[in-house]
């Protein structure tokens, strides 16, 4: 019976180059799990929307123009938080603070705009109770607004931390989490907006 011999050189190479396991910070992993759960919720809701729409008795209406404005506001907030993130990596703390302040202001502006979009819907005789098209619209936009409020709380926490000099190049975990979550909320809104434009 023949046995294969491993050379000393191969043993040394194996010892010098241990395989590094893939890893992620536990808090980052928790954020991604939360994001996946939100994606599943909205995937289920938009699927139910399409199924119900195909059954008929569906009120057709134009989306208020403020939906476009809200989309522009949220896109601007993605740019401002990315600016804050890059500033933190470069230890440009003044730009970090400015970027975080601007992002918080834009987030609040979006929520105010969302309220006015619901007012505009009521003016168009689109109500939460009544035709299912209105019900779905309020549920989709309202649930997104709820998650945006959680994102706004996160933003405020990071804003306070930036003024306390707790966010810098050597302490980026929370900033990365906040930026990732906020970008996700922006992408989610754009998906919902395009979905509603096509299927309203």
Image: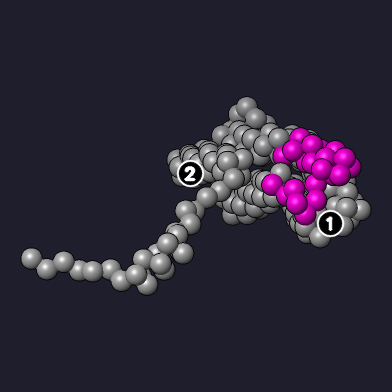
Is the residue 186 above or below the residue 147 in the image?
below
Tell me which residue sits at (52%, 50%) in the image.
Answer: 23
**Quarter of the image holding residue 124?**
top right
Tell me which residue sits at (80%, 46%) in the image.
Answer: 167
- Which circle, 2 or 1, is nearer the viewer? 1
Q: Which residues are magenta?
A: 151-173
Q: Main secondary structure of the magenta part?
A: helix
Q: Which residue is mark 2?
A: 47
Q: Hey, which residue is sitting farthest top in the picture? A: 129
CA distance for labels 2 and 1? 44 Å
Is the residue 98 above or below the residue 136 in the image?
below
Mark closer to the chain start, 2 or 1? 2
Q: Position of residue 60 (x, y in %)?
A: 61, 45
**Quarter of the image holding residue 13?**
bottom left
Q: Which residue is mark 1?
A: 91
Query: Is residue 22 covered in magenta?
Result: no
Foreground residue, 191 or 59? 191
């Amino acid at each position: 019976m023949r046995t294969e011999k491993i050379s000393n050189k191969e043993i040394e190479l194996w010892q010098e180059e241990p395989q590094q396991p893939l890893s992620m910070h536990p808090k980052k992993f928790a954020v991604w799990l939360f994001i996946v759960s939100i994606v599943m919720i909205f995937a289920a809701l938009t699927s139910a929307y399409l199924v119900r729409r195909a059954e008929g008795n569906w009120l057709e209406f134009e989306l208020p123009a403020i939906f476009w404005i809200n989309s522009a506001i949220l896109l601007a907030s993605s740019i401002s938080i990315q600016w804050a993130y890059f500033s933190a990596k470069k230890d440009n703390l003044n730009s970090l603070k400015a970027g975080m302040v601007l992002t918080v202001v834009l987030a609040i502006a979006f929520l105010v705009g969302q309220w006015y979009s619901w007012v505009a819907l009521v003016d168009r005789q689109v109500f939460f109770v009544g035709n299912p098209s209105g019900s779905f619209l309020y549920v989709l936009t309202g649930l997104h607004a709820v998650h945006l409020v959680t994102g706004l709380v996160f933003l405020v926490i990071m804003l306070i931390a930036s003024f306390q000099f707790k966010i810098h190049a050597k302490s980026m975990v929370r900033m990365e989490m906040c930026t990732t979550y906020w970008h996700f909320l922006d992408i989610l809104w754009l998906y919902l907006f395009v979905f509603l434009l096509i299927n309203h």
